[in-house]
Image (tube, rainbow, N blue to C red):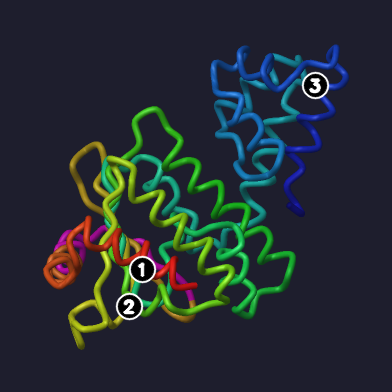
């Protein structure tokens, strides 16, 4: 992606160090080969400590570390920057979306369409896409991923190009098979309910504390005040009470995919 020079730098360093393969670099870093591949396709940006390890492997001074720092500064808006750190630390994530598929569950095609539907410049949209895909990897590809419980309104699953939505629905059905991913759908038959004012996410940290994130038309807000977070937990419980059970939600999503 533009403004992320990490893929180019990594490929150059491997090529100029005896043609080191992705597998060999992964072994040196004690990470998976798929993670190195994600670094080199801009699907994920290395964490600062990983960047330092890469510099040590290639004796490249602070080249990778500085490139990673630039890449991390390029894409996310200032108001969003605190949230990915909480997301990466969380032992449990609970997300609610009334209008879109939750960002962590979006396919690349769906995420690109969502970002393109806004008012972002194309290069900014591509940067945001890269970071969204990177966040997905950070959450789901760790050794011990968090418990992720998502609630989405059925209406959100019926909006979009049919070909794109079929792929997205199949992806949701696949993700819902994971033991630590709990996906629930609020059916259209529910009518009005507590969650319709807008989306939000709750992160339960290793300390046991909860923090929340929500967005409006202008920007986003990370919320740490206990009273406000507690209010959102109450809203979450109210929404969960009208959502379909996990198996029924998965069956509904599968049927919707078959209809497209």
The residue to which callout 1 is attached is: 214
Q: Please state which of residues 253 and 81 is positioned toward the viewer in this rendering.
A: 253
Q: Please state which of residues 158 and 135 is positioned toward the viewer in this rendering.
A: 158
Q: Give the range drawn in magenta.
A: 219-231
For residue 212, say whether it is visible: no
> Mark 3 to mark 2: distance in Å?
46 Å
Secondary structure state at the residue bearing disc 3: helix
The residue to which callout 2 is attached is: 198
In this rendering, the answer to whether 146 lies above or below 81 is above
Residue 113 location (% of width, % of height):
61, 71
> Residue at coordinates 55% horizontally, 23% vertically from top-left?
32
Residue 130 left/right relative to 187: right
> Residue at coordinates 38% horizontally, 48% vertically from top-left?
87
As drawn, the residue found furthest toward the front would be 258
Mark 2 or 1, nearer chain start: 2
For residue 117, say whether it is visible: yes
The crowd level at tag 2 (other Cα within 10 Å; few <14, some 14-19, many 20+) is few
> Residue at coordinates 73% horizontally, 52% vertically from top-left?
1
Mark 3 or 2, nearer chain start: 3
As for residue 224 lying within the magenta part, the answer is yes
Mark 1 or 3, nearer chain start: 3
The residue to which callout 3 is attached is: 14
> Mark 2 to mark 1: distance in Å?
8 Å
Q: Which mark is residue 37?
A: none
Residue 44 location (% of width, % of height):
60, 42
């Amino acid at each position: 992606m533009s403004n992320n020079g990490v893929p180019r730098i990594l490929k150059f360093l491997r090529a100029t160090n005896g043609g080191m393969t992705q597998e060999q670099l992964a072994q040196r870093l004690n990470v998976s080969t798929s993670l190195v591949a994600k670094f080199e396709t801009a699907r994920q940006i290395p964490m600062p400590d990983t960047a330092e390890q890469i510099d040590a492997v290639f004796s490249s001074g602070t080249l990778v570390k500085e490139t990673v720092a630039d890449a991390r500064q390029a894409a996310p808006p200032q108001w969003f920057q605190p949230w990915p750190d909480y997301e990466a630390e969380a032992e449990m994530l609970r997300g609610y979306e009334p209008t879109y598929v939750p960002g962590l569950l979006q396919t690349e095609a769906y995420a690109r369409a969502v970002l393109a539907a806004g008012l972002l410049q194309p290069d900014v949209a591509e940067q945001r896409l890269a970071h969204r895909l990177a966040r997905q990897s950070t959450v789901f590809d760790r050794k011990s991923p968090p418990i992720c419980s998502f609630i989405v309104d059925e209406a959100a699953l019926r909006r979009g190009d049919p070909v794109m939505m079929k792929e997205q629905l199949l992806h949701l059905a696949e993700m819902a098979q994971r033991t630590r991913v709990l996906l629930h759908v609020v059916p259209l038959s529910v009518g009005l309910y507590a969650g319709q004012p807008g989306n939000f996410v709750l992160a339960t940290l290793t300390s046991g504390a909860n923090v929340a994130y929500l967005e409006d038309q202008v920007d986003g807000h990370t919320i740490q005040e206990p009273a406000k977070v507690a209010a959102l937990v109450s809203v979450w419980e109210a929404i969960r009470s009208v959502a379909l059970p996990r198996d029924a939600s998965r069956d509904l999503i599968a049927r919707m995919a078959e209809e497209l």
